[in-house]
Image: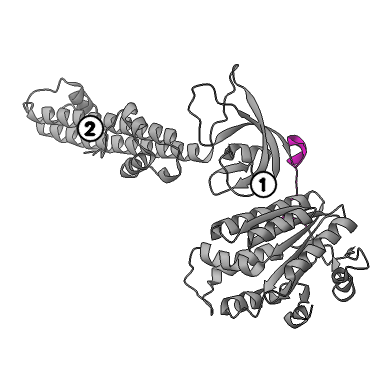
């Protein structure tokens, strides 16, 4: 007999909270319930409960008919619909016992068929629910609807996507993008898009995230022209071939010395190794200003991870470029989110043939953030570093390359040493052999200034 853990009407289901609906869905065996929205959960639960009730009712009727067939006299010919099925499946000259056995066999066969149909119905409901979770229906525009322009960065997560309208971190005005729209328009994480959302009507309850109605441009070009793109991983990497000149004024010696002893090319993957208070942030600032003056065609991105808020303000005001920051008072998850979205944004620009320079301060603190935020793999290196936590920063740093037939991604990252922490030493040793340029700052020389 089919058992129903919960029986509720649509109104009762709609009145439940989302955790209660997820608990009911898990009792009913709906797959992917934890990822569904409330309206999809209500629809899936109601459909499955209705199917279960119909199946239970049909099963009760079948058992009642089977009992009636057993109570009938053995020498009487069956006259009911159940006995007619028995006559079709047995010989006309068989006795009452044969008819009864044939009826039982047919009942069992029908029960099995109903069970299979019921299972197929459940599978269809599950498939429908999963499709609903994966691919939302595109919103319908009414005559009275007012469309509002919106723009931002595309952030693609596991089963849903958003347009980040207030920078690189999640915000209250983010726009939801369905998976169907992502596949239809070929959107990728880090794309800058513009589109329209529907403005809420008067008295209408505002949704947590407005869905995207129309998509107009992707990375500054119309949608149709943006779809045929080559993936970043399929581009051919080369050694740096074009040099980035850093010398600007005779009085600024830092960039002149770098040009002499450690020249930087487009596509370089360099480490600035320094102990604390050795001036690595000032060196990054000087490099950023020199690039913006001598190479205005380069898209400059400065990523500050786990830095002081006043340093972020100073960098924002002094550098003519894009400054992406997550200060030390924010959780480690925010550090990893902005780093991943920033490098994906840089990759999208390189796919379009642009030259991009990313200055990261610092890759050591980014490794610490991943060590805190990443799920534990069970393999711990010396210094308390999880082996799985080193892969994402290495992926970030390894994205730097010069691309054949146009485009380059240059990454200069700072690495901390001599901090007294074994963890910092392990992180530095892990990245020491991955770069193709290394600039070492001496604290003793910095103290003589």
Element at badge 2?
Answer: helix
- Measure the alpha-carbon separation of dots 2 and 1: 50 Å
Q: How far from the left and from the top, in percent, is residue 267?
A: 81, 63
Numbered range of the magenta stretch: 219-235
Q: How far from the left and from the top, in percent, is residue 40?
A: 43, 34
- Residue 21's image quarter? top left
Between 397 and 179, which is closer to the camera in this rendering? Answer: 397
Q: How far from the left and from the top, in percent, is residue 310?
A: 67, 59
Seen as rendered, the residue at the extreme right is 250
The answer to whether residue 59 is visible is yes
Element at badge 1?
Answer: loop
How many badges with numbers are in the image?
A: 2
Q: How far from the left and from the top, in percent, is residue 174?
A: 59, 40
Report the quarter where the N terminus lies: top left
Q: Residue at x 57, y 28 (%)?
A: 139
Seen as rendered, the residue at the extreme front is 449
Image disc number at residue 188: 1
Mark 2 neighbour density, 10 Å: few (under 14) some (14–19) many (20 or more): some
- Residue 11's image quarter? top left
Magenta-colored stretch includes residue 314: no
């Amino acid at each position: 007999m089919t058992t129903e853990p919960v029986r509720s009407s649509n109104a009762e289901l709609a009145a439940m909270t989302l955790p209660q609906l997820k608990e009911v869905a898990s009792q009913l065996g709906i797959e992917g319930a934890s990822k569904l929205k409330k309206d999809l959960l209500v629809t899936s639960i109601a459909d499955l409960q209705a199917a279960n009730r119909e199946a239970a009712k049909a099963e009760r009727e079948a058992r009642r008919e089977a009992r009636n067939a057993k109570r009938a006299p053995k020498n009487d010919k069956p006259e009911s619909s159940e006995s007619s099925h028995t006559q079709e499946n047995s010989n006309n000259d068989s006795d009452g016992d044969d008819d009864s056995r044939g009826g039982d066999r047919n009942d069992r066969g029908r029960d099995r068929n109903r069970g299979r149909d019921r299972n197929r119905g459940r599978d269809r409901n599950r498939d429908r629910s999963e499709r609903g979770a994966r691919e939302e229906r595109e919103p319908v525009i009414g005559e009275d609807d007012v469309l509002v322009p919106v723009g931002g960065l595309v952030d693609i997560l596991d089963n849903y996507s958003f347009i980040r309208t207030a920078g690189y971190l999640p915000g209250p005005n983010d726009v939801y993008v369905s998976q169907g729209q992502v596949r239809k328009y070929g959107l990728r994480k880090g794309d800058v898009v513009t589109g329209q959302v529907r403005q809420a009507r008067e008295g209408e309850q505002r949704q947590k995230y407005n869905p995207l109605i129309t998509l107009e441009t992707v990375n500054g070009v119309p949608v149709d022209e943006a779809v045929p793109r080559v993936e970043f991983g399929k581009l051919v990497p080369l050694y740096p071939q074009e040099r980035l000149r850093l010398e600007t004024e005779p009085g600024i010696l830092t960039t002149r010395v770098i040009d002499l002893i450690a020249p930087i090319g487009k596509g370089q993957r360099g480490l600035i190794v320094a102990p604390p208070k050795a001036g690595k942030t000032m060196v990054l600032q000087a490099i950023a200003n020199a690039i913006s003056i001598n190479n205005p065609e380069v898209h400059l991105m400065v990523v500050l991870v786990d830095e002081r808020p006043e340093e972020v303000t100073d960098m924002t005001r002094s550098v003519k470029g894009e400054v992406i920051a997550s200060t030390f008072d924010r959780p480690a998850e925010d550090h990893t989110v902005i780093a991943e979205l920033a490098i994906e944004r840089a990759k999208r620009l390189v796919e379009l043939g642009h030259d991009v320079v990313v200055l990261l301060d610092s890759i050591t603190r980014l490794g610490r953030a991943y060590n805190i935020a990443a799920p534990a793999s069970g393999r711990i290196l010396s210094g308390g570093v999880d082996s799985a936590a080193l892969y994402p920063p290495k992926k970030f740093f390894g994205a730097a390359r010069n691309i054949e037939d146009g485009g380059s991604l240059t990454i200069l990252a700072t690495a901390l040493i001599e901090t007294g922490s074994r963890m910092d030493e392990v992180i530095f040793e892990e990245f020491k052999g991955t770069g193709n340029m290394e600039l070492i700052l001496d604290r003793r020389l910095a103290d003589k200034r």
